[in-house]
Amino acid sequence: MLGGWESNAILRMMWAGGWMMWPLAFVGVWVLYLLLLQSMEMWRIWRSMNTWIAEKPRLGAEVEHEMALVDWRMALVRVPVLTQTLISSAPLMGLLGTVSGMITTFEALADGALHQPSGGIAGGIAQALLTTQLGLSIALPALLWQQLLGRWASRLVHRLDALQDTKTTESSR
């Protein structure tokens, strides 16, 4: 749990970053939630496959096992479009915040207000840099996490193929 000074520092940073920081934070939480759900689904499939391999199939369970294989394959090859879209949008949202911060900077320059209570030039530059930083801080780890999940899914699909080949070979005997 965050202490008093950490939460105050985070809130000050969020306010200093301008209006785009809040949607970016929302996207970051949403991406984290979706990646956790995908990870839990992969873990469930992996455990189910290992259990299925370890147990001896009982008589009449072939149809049930075939349906499980089909369900697992569909879950593994499904492309998480929403997650990809949110990960791709985070740096763009950061860029939008950067543009907003630069507009604030140029307005301060035009007004000749180098030192304002609202931050003036320094406030606009801080806003620009903070939104860029948050957008990239969301996108880069999320992209790596998603790539790792994709590699894991690929391995599980290959394992499913091997299981189906083994099952087909056993049933043809």
Image: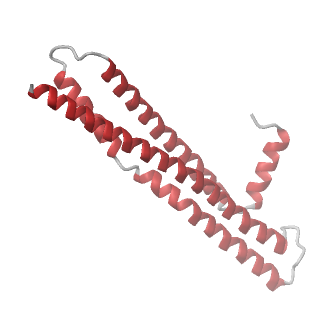
| Rendered location of residue 44, percent (x, y) | 41, 29
Q: What residue is rendered at 81% in x and 49% in y?
A: 9
Q: Position of residue 172 (x, y in %)?
A: 9, 28
In this picture the colour scheme is: secondary structure
Asked whether 104 or 27 is in front, the reply is: 27
| Residue 162 shown left or right of residue 40 in the figure | left
Please give left or right for residue 100 compared with residue 44 in the image: right
Task: Give the quarter of the image for residue 157.
Answer: top left
Q: In this view, does 131 lie above or below 121?
A: above
Image coordinates for residue 135, horizontal then vertical, percent: 62, 59
Looking at the image, which is closer to me, 2 or 168? Answer: 168
**Which residue is painted at 21% across and 24% down in the image?**
64
Residue at the image point whose x is 17% and y is 23% from the top: 62
Relative to residue 73, is residue 36 drawn left or right? right
Q: In which quarter of the image is residue 160?
A: top left
Quadrant where the N terminus lies?
top right
Q: In the visual, does 147 lie left or right of 5?
A: left
Q: Total marks drawn?
A: 0
